[in-house]
């Protein structure tokens, strides 16, 4: 996630292609919401919550079980 550092931002602001992510627990997401397992944009695969305990990997089109307290990320 982007850090707030006003002194550095003045000289080197983040690019407009950078992504900001917000941390959630899996059970906090609504059905059909998109989420990612990490907050690193280059190595991230999008997922969609399809039930209270399952998510679908949108790249491989496979379903996986998630624990309710699993930390996931959403783009803001």
Image (cartoon, grey):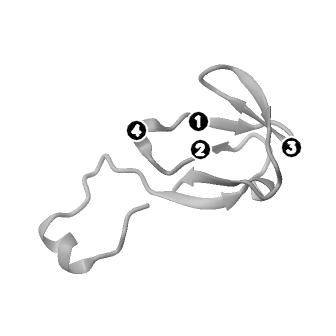
Disc 4 vs disc 2: Cβ atoms closer than 8 Å? no
Q: CA distance from mark 1 to mark 4?
A: 12 Å
Q: Is residue 75 left or right of residue 54?
A: left
Name the residue rendered at 16%, 73% in the picture: 10
Q: Nearer the viewer, mark 1 or mark 4?
A: 4
Name the residue rendered at 26%, 59% in the picture: 14
Disc 1 vs disc 2: Cβ atoms closer than 8 Å? yes
| Residue 16 % position (x, y) | 28, 51
Name the residue rendered at 77%, 59% in the picture: 28
Going from the N terminus, do you reach mark 3 or mark 2 first? 2
Count neighbours of disc 2 (C-alpha within 10 A) and say few if under 14, some if 14 to 19, many if 20 or more: many
Q: Is residue 17 above or below residue 22?
A: above
Quarter of the picture holding the N terminus:
bottom left
Q: Is residue 55 left or right of residue 74?
A: right
Q: CA distance from mark 4 to mark 2?
A: 12 Å
Q: Is residue 30 above or below residue 69?
A: above
SS at mark 4 in the image? helix
Count neighbours of disc 3 (C-alpha within 10 A) and say few if under 14, some if 14 to 19, many if 20 or more: few
Q: Quadrant of residue 33?
A: top right
Count neighbours of disc 1 (C-alpha within 10 A) and say few if under 14, some if 14 to 19, many if 20 or more: some
Going from the N terminus, do you reach mark 3 or mark 4 first? 4
**Which of the labelled discs sits on residue 46, or is there none?**
1
SS at mark 2 in the image? loop
Name the residue rendered at 59%, 53% in the picture: 73
**Which of the labelled discs sits on residue 42, or is there none?**
4
Going from the N terminus, do you reach mark 4 or mark 2 first? 2
Q: CA distance from mark 1 to mark 2?
A: 5 Å
Q: Which residue is mark 3?
A: 53
| Residue 46 % position (x, y) | 58, 35
Q: Is residue 10 above or below residue 52?
A: below
Q: Which residue is mark 2?
A: 36
Q: CA distance from mark 3 to mark 2?
A: 15 Å
């Amino acid at each position: 996630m982007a850090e707030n550092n006003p002194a550095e931002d003045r000289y080197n602001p983040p690019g407009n292609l950078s992504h900001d992510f917000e941390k959630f627990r899996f059970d906090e997401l609504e059905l059909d919401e998109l989420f990612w397992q990490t907050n690193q944009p280059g190595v991230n695969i999008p997922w969609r919550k399809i039930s209270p305990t399952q998510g679908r990997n949108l790249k491989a089109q496979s379903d996986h079980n998630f624990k309710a307290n699993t930390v996931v990320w959403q783009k803001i």
